[in-house]
Image: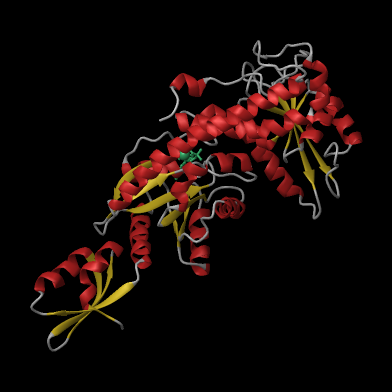
Amino acid sequence: MPGSEDDWLATDNAQGAVGSEESHRGAFGDYGATSNAFIDRSFRERIVLVGVSFPPHDDELIDEHLDELSRLIDTAGADEVGRVVQRRQSPDASTYVGSGKAQEIRELAEAFDCDTVVFDDELTPAQQYNLEKILGRTAIDRTAVILDIFAQNASSLEGKAQVELAQLKYRLPRLRGKGRNLSQQGSSGGSGTRIGTRGPGETQLEVDRRRLVRRIHKLEEQLRGIAHVRDTQRKARRRGLLRNVVIVGYTNAGKSTLLNRLTDSGVLVEDRLFATLDPTTRRLQLPGGEAVLLTDTVGFVRKLPHQLVEAFKSTLEVVTDADLLVHVVDGSAVDPQAEIEAVRDVLESIGATSIPELLVFNKADRSDEPARLAERFTEQSEGAVAISAVTGDGVEHLLATIGARLRALVTPVDLEIPYERGDLIAAVHRSGEVLSATPGERTLRMTARLEESEVGRFEEFQVTA
Ligand SMILES: Nc1nc2c(ncn2[C@@H]2O[C@H](COP(=O)(O)OP(=O)(O)OP(=O)(O)O)[C@@H](O)[C@H]2O)c(=O)[nH]1
Ligand SMILES: [Mg+2]
């Protein structure tokens, strides 16, 4: 593995957090301290949320999104003290909400003594810069909040590197967004510049950018190294011929709880968002006797930052490599359908849409809704299951369904095996699933599902149906 641990943990704190104005307590932007985080956790920041509704206006939806943003902020270690919703035809190019509204938000922020204003959609670097000027405090977006939570929760070297990479990619264009401001500061020589790093005539902005780009390249290289190790391990597993069943789903749906319930893994389960960042794989024995590999993965969310999806590419390869996706849905959530769609959007963006998916509506102990949803989806598609990962209700049925779905993935072959090859007939029974067996004069005609790796063994007896 490339790099020492120290190497991994060393972060250039000067990135992005370049301002030294101490007029407010927020952690990011011109008003920020020198931390790498977007939200300061040395105290609980007071935050005003801003949502903008575009046509067709759906107030309930905006509220739902802001409720979720509020949970994200709470998970990141801050408190919502107020929220603003605005209707617009389209975003304002320079301030997102329009400068009049921004002025109102400033007054509200002052009334609430708020540290930071968080916007529910991604702001362009220019919008962010302009808003901070008008608001007189840190302005960040949902993406920054999610990046912050990931940064807090990352524990493995790979997870930390992936999150840092995503953060830097988010910061890079934002450095440029504040360019003029920065180059003026350049000659003052402050904010974290290492002695001797600035060439003649180079502005502070150029130095910062160069360091950031260098760090991005280094992280990418380190991640490639880890991905290579992971790839080798995966190939070894493939040789073990075990099928890969991968648990995916919205954050907090109960994915880790399910893995623990099925395999006694002791994976961290928490009522907070993005508790899991690193995949955990365990062997699972299905009731039919076959063993599979079951993997728990990072949760998805609406508007998951593309920087994160890119940075987690190698972690997410476990998803694109799956034989079956077990898509866990919190059936007791306000809008499970929207969460399913958000997950499917991410699956699409990583190229995993062709992998068979089994919908599992979880938290059936909380309400009847998961059972109702499972029924409704079963009518529409290939079947869905309702479970409670906490009580274990429905889990047996889930396992049987996983087994059946995996078997259905293998196309049956037709074989004619002479009776004197009783050893082979027994082998078909042992290593596959016999769908039918019809005695002929000298041969036994069988239709069976065989593991791909086994098909070759019986090739000379294969017939076309
Ligand atoms: N009532 C109830 N709560 C559940 C059930 N399954 C999970 N939970 C709770 O839901 C919360 C999230 O569970 P996790 O297993 O951590 O969810 P996750 O999908 O792994 O979440 P992330 O890793 O954060 O994406 C925890 O508080 C669990 O106790 C269930 O069947 N019933
Ligand atoms: Mg989890």
In the displayed structure, would residue 131 be above or below residue 361? above
Where in the figure is residue 345, as x and y percent of width and height?
Answer: 60, 53
23 is higher (above) or lower (below) than 304: above
Res 115 quadrant in image: top right
Q: Position of residue 86 (x, y in %)?
A: 83, 42
Residue 265 pos. (x, y %): 34, 38
Please state if 461 lies on the left or on the right of 247 as rendered: left
Residue farthest left in this picture: 420
Give the left or right position of residue 359, taking residue 33 as reference.
left
Instruction: Identify the residue at horizontal 36%, vertical 48% (top origin).
Output: 294
Q: Is residue 326 left or right of residue 148?
A: left
Furthest residue to the front?
Answer: 200
Front-most of residues 305 and 98: 305
Which residue corresponds to the image point at 44% horizontal and 22% vertical from the top-left? 5
Q: Quadrant of the C terminus?
A: bottom left
402 left or right of 375 in image? left
- Quarter of the picture containing the N terminus is top left
Task: Answer above or below: position of 239 versus 71.
Answer: below
Query: On screen, 27 above or below 75?
Result: above
